Amino acid sequence: MVPLAAESAPVMWKRNLEVYEAAVRLATSGKMRGWESIREKLVQKGYRRVPDLLQGDKIRTVLDICCKAARDKKTEG
Protein backbone atom coordinates (compact mmCIF):
# COMPACT_ATOMS: atom_id res chain seq x y z
CA MET A 1 0.00 0.00 0.00
CA VAL A 2 1.31 3.46 -0.93
CA PRO A 3 1.15 6.11 1.80
CA LEU A 4 -1.30 8.94 1.15
CA ALA A 5 1.48 11.55 1.11
CA ALA A 6 3.29 9.67 -1.65
CA GLU A 7 0.11 9.45 -3.72
CA SER A 8 -0.64 13.15 -3.47
CA ALA A 9 2.93 14.46 -3.95
CA PRO A 10 2.88 14.30 -7.78
CA VAL A 11 -0.55 15.93 -7.85
CA MET A 12 0.61 18.70 -5.50
CA TRP A 13 3.76 19.24 -7.57
CA LYS A 14 1.69 19.50 -10.75
CA ARG A 15 -0.68 22.02 -9.16
CA ASN A 16 2.24 24.10 -7.90
CA LEU A 17 3.78 24.05 -11.37
CA GLU A 18 0.46 25.24 -12.84
CA VAL A 19 0.50 28.21 -10.45
CA TYR A 20 4.08 29.14 -11.39
CA GLU A 21 3.30 28.82 -15.11
CA ALA A 22 0.21 31.00 -14.75
CA ALA A 23 2.23 33.58 -12.81
CA VAL A 24 4.89 33.74 -15.52
CA ARG A 25 2.25 34.02 -18.26
CA LEU A 26 0.72 36.99 -16.46
CA ALA A 27 4.13 38.54 -15.80
CA THR A 28 5.10 38.35 -19.46
CA SER A 29 1.74 39.64 -20.70
CA GLY A 30 2.66 43.27 -20.10
CA LYS A 31 -0.58 43.81 -18.19
CA MET A 32 0.64 43.31 -14.61
CA ARG A 33 2.44 45.86 -12.41
CA GLY A 34 4.30 43.29 -10.31
CA TRP A 35 4.09 40.13 -8.23
CA GLU A 36 1.37 41.58 -5.97
CA SER A 37 -1.02 42.17 -8.88
CA ILE A 38 -0.23 38.67 -10.14
CA ARG A 39 -1.03 37.22 -6.72
CA GLU A 40 -4.37 39.06 -6.63
CA LYS A 41 -5.31 37.95 -10.15
CA LEU A 42 -4.47 34.29 -9.50
CA VAL A 43 -6.37 34.26 -6.20
CA GLN A 44 -9.38 35.69 -8.05
CA LYS A 45 -9.04 32.86 -10.58
CA GLY A 46 -9.23 30.32 -7.74
CA TYR A 47 -5.58 29.39 -7.21
CA ARG A 48 -5.71 29.02 -3.43
CA ARG A 49 -2.01 28.20 -2.92
CA VAL A 50 -0.74 31.38 -4.57
CA PRO A 51 0.03 33.29 -1.35
CA ASP A 52 2.18 30.39 -0.11
CA LEU A 53 3.90 29.77 -3.43
CA LEU A 54 4.76 33.42 -4.05
CA GLN A 55 6.27 34.04 -0.60
CA GLY A 56 9.92 33.84 -1.58
CA ASP A 57 11.97 36.91 -2.47
CA LYS A 58 13.48 35.17 -5.51
CA ILE A 59 10.17 34.37 -7.23
CA ARG A 60 8.86 37.83 -6.40
CA THR A 61 11.96 39.46 -7.89
CA VAL A 62 11.77 37.33 -11.03
CA LEU A 63 8.09 38.16 -11.52
CA ASP A 64 8.73 41.88 -10.98
CA ILE A 65 11.57 41.85 -13.53
CA CYS A 66 9.40 39.97 -16.05
CA CYS A 67 6.53 42.42 -15.53
CA LYS A 68 8.76 45.44 -16.06
CA ALA A 69 10.43 43.96 -19.14
CA ALA A 70 7.06 43.06 -20.66
CA ARG A 71 5.63 46.52 -19.96
CA ASP A 72 8.74 48.21 -21.39
CA LYS A 73 8.56 46.05 -24.50
CA LYS A 74 4.86 46.82 -24.89
CA THR A 75 5.46 50.59 -24.77
CA GLU A 76 8.31 50.33 -27.31
CA GLY A 77 6.19 48.47 -29.85
Image (cartoon, rainbow, N blue to C red):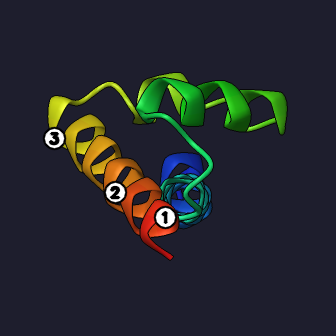
Image: 53 above or below 74: above
Give the residue at the far front of this rendering: 76
Image: 64 above or below 12: above
Discs 2, 1 touching: Cβ within 8 Å: yes
As helix, strand or loop, the secondary structure at mark 2 comes to helix
Image: 30 above or below 10: above
Relative placement, left or right, of 68 versus 20 is: left
> Residues under labels 2 and 1: Cα distance?
6 Å
Q: Identify the residue at image location x=53%, y=52%.
A: 23
In x, y percent, where is residue 26? 59, 55
Name the residue carrying label 2. Answer: 66
In x, y percent, where is residue 17? 50, 63
Instruction: Using the image, tell me which numbered label, if any, was put on residue 28.
Output: 1
Name the residue carrying label 3. Answer: 58
As helix, strand or loop, the secondary structure at mark 3 comes to helix
Q: Residues within 10 Å of mark 3 (few under 14, many from 20)?
A: few
Viewer-proximal residue, 53 or 11? 53
Q: Residues within 10 Å of mark 1 (few under 14, many from 20)?
A: some
Could you tell which of marks 2 and 3 lies nearer the N-terminus?
A: 3
Viewer-proximal residue, 33 or 25? 33
